[in-house]
Amino acid sequence: MLKIFRQKNVTKFVLWGLLILILPAFVLWGTGADRGRSKEKGPTFVGLIEGKKVTFDDFADSIVSIRCQVIMNYFNQPEVMNAFLKSKAFIGKLAWDKLLVAREAEKANIKVSNDEVVNFIRNQPIFLRGGVFDDKVYYYVLRNNMGLEPREFEEMLRSNLRIQKYNDLLTKDISVADEEIVAAYEKDNNKIKISYLAFPADNFIDKVKVEDAEIKDYYEAHKNELTAPAKEESMDKAAETTDAFDNVKADIKTFLTRKLSGELAVKSAGGEYDRIMRLMAKENLTFEASAAKLGLEIVESGFFSRNESIEGIGGTGQIADAAAKLKADEVSGVVETEKGTVIFKVVGSQKYDEEKFKEEKNDYLQKTIRPKKAQLLNDRLRKLNDASKVNIDFEDFEKYYR
């Protein structure tokens, strides 16, 4: 790693079982001597940034950089990692965006020292063994999973860190008022208690039947979003398509069953809501009394915040959002939750802990400032994209290479 690591004579790699299980061997397109050569037919360069041609070599380097970053970020979430790596359009767009911002960072004369590169590498979980950086793991991952030599990888990271510094420079003056921090903290930490009627989606599963034709139709409409294990290149296309469908068929059926049972829960809740509202208006009854008269079971929760869960309901974020819009003693409409549907009324509230807020205020400062920074950077990137020109289709970028 830089000179400090290259001085070490690593001649033997130990293949740790965990490492092999987590990191299947990836062939990173764009590495090696053949990268970046465009075909005889088609564009001779990828696009224009500030009127200057972006070569296929530059784009190939950026592709490799993005793929390496995905591996580093998601190596312990292989399904997510594979989904990202398989999406050519996603990888290609990120690679182009990186080139745009890298050009801006270069113009801003942003520097990254060797020490900064080394410190970053030493703290990446993918290169740790027993919580400590291990150069054997480092070299193994680079050569066998990323297809890169240390110098290539380290200069790639230098470019990434340069971009991060540039982004930090652009956003350094963004601030938030104390009122915004308090509001964000209240949203997450104020607690409410509710009386509610629950309509779990599971109660309606037996009423749902998903036909094979529906499963096939869903697959055809969404197959580009679905992931399945990679097939051998020698497999014929028809067999590959059939196997891909078979691999996800059961999951699609489960998804559609849950979706349809959830829709039935919403419909049932809507009917009961109408009955309750009519009874409350006609006989001047409370929500609880109206439900009881209709033979419906009201449940009262304990105090909860938006980041907690209730048995049979799941996460309470949707309930908290709906509760924030209610007046005193007002009954909510039909609110869809993680596991079904509820109708509720707020029956109590608790303010957040002032002392705990003091301890966590800085965390919430960062939480409230993060989306503002993201918006600024997104706006900047949009302008850079508008001013640039792309000659290739990111979905099929490989066809432009030999």
Image: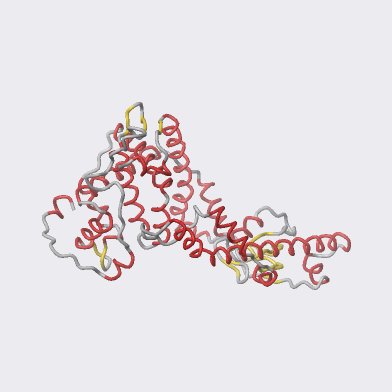
Quarter of the image for the C terminus: give it: top left
Farthest residue, direction top: 51
Picture coordinates of residue 87, whole percent (x, y) = 42, 50
Q: Residue at x 18, y 65 (%)?
A: 13
Pick out the residue farthest to the right.
Answer: 282
Could you tell me how many numbered marks the image carries?
0
Q: Nearer the viewer, residue 141 or 252?
A: 252
In this rendering, the answer to whether 321 lies above or below 287 is above
Q: Quadrant of residue 26?
A: bottom left
Q: Identify which residue, 112 or 5, lies in the foreground.
A: 5
The front one of 5 and 308 is 5
Please give the name of the residue rendered at 43% of the width and 56% of the height, measured from the top-left corner: 83
Left or right: where 328 falls relative to 56: right
Instruction: Identify the coloring.
Output: secondary structure
- Tell me residue 332's x, y (percent): 72, 58
Q: Position of residue 77 (x, y in %)?
A: 40, 62
The spot of residue 14 in percent (x, y) is 20, 68
Q: Decide which of 339, 61 is in the foreground and name it.
A: 61
Residue drawn at (46%, 50%) of the image: 365
Residue 74: name its quadrant.
Answer: bottom left
- 13 vs 29, left or right, is left
For residue 316, which quarter of the picture? bottom right
Considering only vertical position in the picture, is 183 above or below 38? below
Q: Residue at x 36, y 28 (%)?
A: 50
